[in-house]
Image: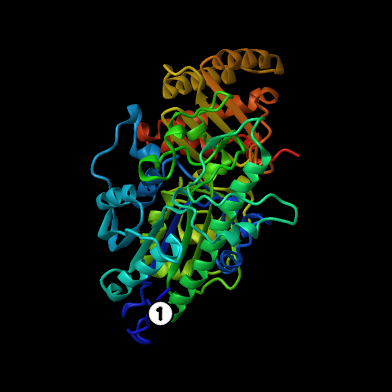
Amino acid sequence: MASSNDHGDGLDGIDSMGRFANAIVVTIEGLGTNLVGCYGNALTPTPTFDRFASQSLVADQFWMDGIDPVEVLESMWSGLHRRERVGAQGLEKASPPKIKIPGILVTDDPRVYEAALRYVDGEVQLVDIAYTMETRFSSLVSDALNQWIPNLEKYPWLWIHSRGLSGPWDAPYELRLAMCDEGDPQPPSVVEPPVSLVDSSTDPDRIFGWACGAGGQAIAMDEVWGLLTEAIQELGFESSAMVILAGIQGYPLGEHGMVGLGGIDAEDGGGTAESNKATSTDGSKGPGAMYAERLHCPLIIRPGDQLPLSIRFSQFVQPHHLARLLEEWLEGSASIRQDSGLAKCNDEQIPRSSEGEVVAGQGWTLATMIHGAGVDRLKWLPFQRSAMAWDESEVALMLPSWAARYSTVVYDVQLEAAIRELAKQSERISDQAESLGERGEIEERNERVANELKIELFAMPDDRWQQNEISARAPAIIDAMNSVVNAWMQIGVHGRDRLAQLLWSLDEALLTPIR
């Protein structure tokens, strides 16, 4: 990978006003938490990602707000959750807001290129990567740096978006073999990303081979990340540049009956025609199933050299929060520099209005991330307490102690209307319930709803891969979550107030993990 220092020692990323003037964001499709060592993966060695995380802010709960990478990126660029941008009846709001400060975005994904033209102020480049001895990711990063470095004064930030695991799996084959122990079957050598349904008849060796392929890609990306950080250091603004690594969709490897990203990129060669028709045998939408392996991704943020040690925070973060973080850093207000220390948050530091009322979450800032590390979840601000992902046939709701997935079983049933009716019934039952004797009514109602909606419940955070579905054992928990998911569904129509109110008053059973 080529890098340059032709601009001399004066290029330190801070202008004459003392503002932070540089940021690099790298987003990678298919990079889930299961492929990065600092998120608990012990099988895929990613020492460079882990070393980067050791001096960064590490988000333990970064969740996508949809299942299409383009829509996730639109949330990042606009600062609006997908449900806010696309309101009731699936209508896209006009005139999307843009990142106010111009920069350069470079991608190898034609769909991302087209979307970025609407959201990004500055230059948007589509890189056509021909076959080389390097991986596509390495070539993309090199090309992006070469385009950005001569234009640093004009464009203070660079955004690199890679198709990642949704593109060809072109890492050297020996990296796949590095995932194998003696006696393990050799993984396949094909470069096309696998897309397949998985059931009891699927050969486990095939799943193992696909996992080795995904791991090999992650190892190759990890090596390129080392070259990128070296280039940043050579440019002279390692101490002043905000560097962000974010996964955009994890890559399912059979955890819930599906391998692959379901053919979203089938026309571009990232899937197969067969995958577009695939649905899993348990009634869930195989290609778009909103489970943790697809929605839970790494987010690692290094704010210059201000963090000698990593800070991990457990509050929920979603893609739309990154727009404010980036603008905040580039605008470089004095309050950012003042608040970027290692101070811990206590009850007095929670943001409040002049009247003493708690501020109802205006989105994440660098300060709230740093100060929020280690804060008891009972003191989390409203929008730190929840994450939601949505499309027309599925909704995933994540709370500190529970995660639920709502999906349509009957195809002519509108998910939005069904959830709204479910919430009304839940609130009515909750208002009337004064004894445990009402639980039978809740269970009967949930059974009726099951004819139209499939509701799955998982314990958070211990069941991180959502393998133990326990909705039948906790009907009261589902009942308590229904009003929250409905408020999320209405956020594009009624705004954030109702949702903030519900999140701030969450029952302790939804905030404290079960023991």
In which quarter of the view is residue 21 placed?
bottom left
Q: Name the residue located 64 percent from the left edge and 24 percent from the top edge.
A: 476
User: Image quadrant for the C terminus?
Assistant: top right
Q: Is residue 360 above or below residue 507?
A: below
Q: Position of residue 39 (x, y in %)?
A: 62, 55
Q: Would you place residue 348 above or below residue 407 in this image?
A: below
Q: Nearer the viewer, residue 379 or 283?
A: 283
Q: Secondary structure at mark 1?
A: helix
Q: Position of residue 350 (x, y in %)?
A: 53, 54
Three-letter amino acid code at disc 1?
Leu
- The number of numbered badges drawn on the structure is 1
Q: Nearer the viewer, residue 311 or 462?
A: 462
Q: Residue 271 placed where, x, y %?
A: 44, 41
- The colour mode here is rainbow
Q: Is residue 223 left or right of residue 325?
A: right
Q: Which residue is more in the foreground, 280 or 453?
A: 280
381 vs 10: above or below: above
Question: Can residue 15 be seen by looking at this rendering?
Answer: yes
Q: Quadrant of residue 149?
A: bottom left
* Extreme residue in the bottom direction: 9
User: What residue is disc 1 on?
Assistant: 235
- Residue 258: percent from left, percent from top: 56, 36
Screen quadrant of the N terminus: bottom left
Q: Is residue 304 visible?
A: no
Please tell me which residue is depicted at 63% across the width and 30% down the height of the picture. 199
388 vs 15, left or right, is right
Q: Would you call the spot at circle 1 few (<14 residues within 10 Å), some (14-19), or many (20 or more)?
A: many
